[in-house]
Image (cartoon, rainbow, N blue to C red):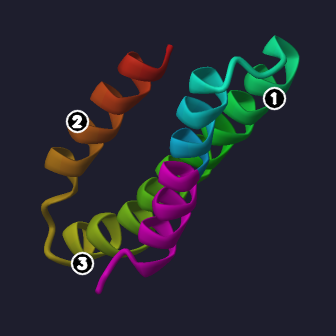
Amino acid sequence: MKHDTAYKTLKNAKGQLEASLKMLEENRYCVDISNQLMATIALIKRANKQILSEHLNHCVIESIENNDAETKIKEIEQLIERMM
């Protein structure tokens, strides 16, 4: 699979999110739930970084080699806009 690392990271995030839901069901301490959620968010951000890094290191390089870099540059600009 092309995105093995990101897949594993998101599977971990899924497990943490499920743990957060269980903590809510059990009426656990709010700060503990919040810490679990922040850890989940960090994993999702890491997976996104992994996906974008793969995109830059594979898709963008391939586009440059095929003289079609403008399309990828526009995609990256759109991503940057959504992140801001």
Numbered tag placed on residue 35 in the rendering: 1
Q: Secondary structure at mark 3?
A: helix
Could you tell which of marks 2 and 3 lies nearer the N-terminus? Answer: 3
Q: Is residue 3 left or right of residue 46?
A: left
Spatial separation of the CA atoms under disc 1 and disc 2: 36 Å
**Is-magenta flag for residue 10?**
yes
Along the line of sight, the residue nearer the viewer: 69 or 55: 55
**Is-magenta flag for residue 12?**
yes
Residue hosting label 2: 74
Q: Quadrant of residue 54?
A: bottom left
Q: Quadrant of the N terminus?
A: bottom left
Structural crowding at the residue carrying mark 1, measured as other residues with C-alpha within 10 Å and reported as few (<14), some (14–19) or many (≥20):
few
Q: Report the predominant secondary structure element of the magenta stretch.
A: helix
Along the line of sight, the residue nearer the viewer: 28 or 80: 28
Disc 3 residue type (three-letter): Glu
Q: Specify start and end residues of the magenta stretch as a single range.
A: 1-15
Q: Position of residue 76 (x, y in %)?
A: 34, 39
Spatial separation of the CA atoms under disc 3 and disc 1: 44 Å
Q: Does 63 appear above or below 47?
A: below
Q: Quadrant of residue 63?
A: bottom left
Could you tell which of marks 1 and 2 lies nearer the N-terminus? Answer: 1
Residue in the image at 84% along x and 17% along y: 29
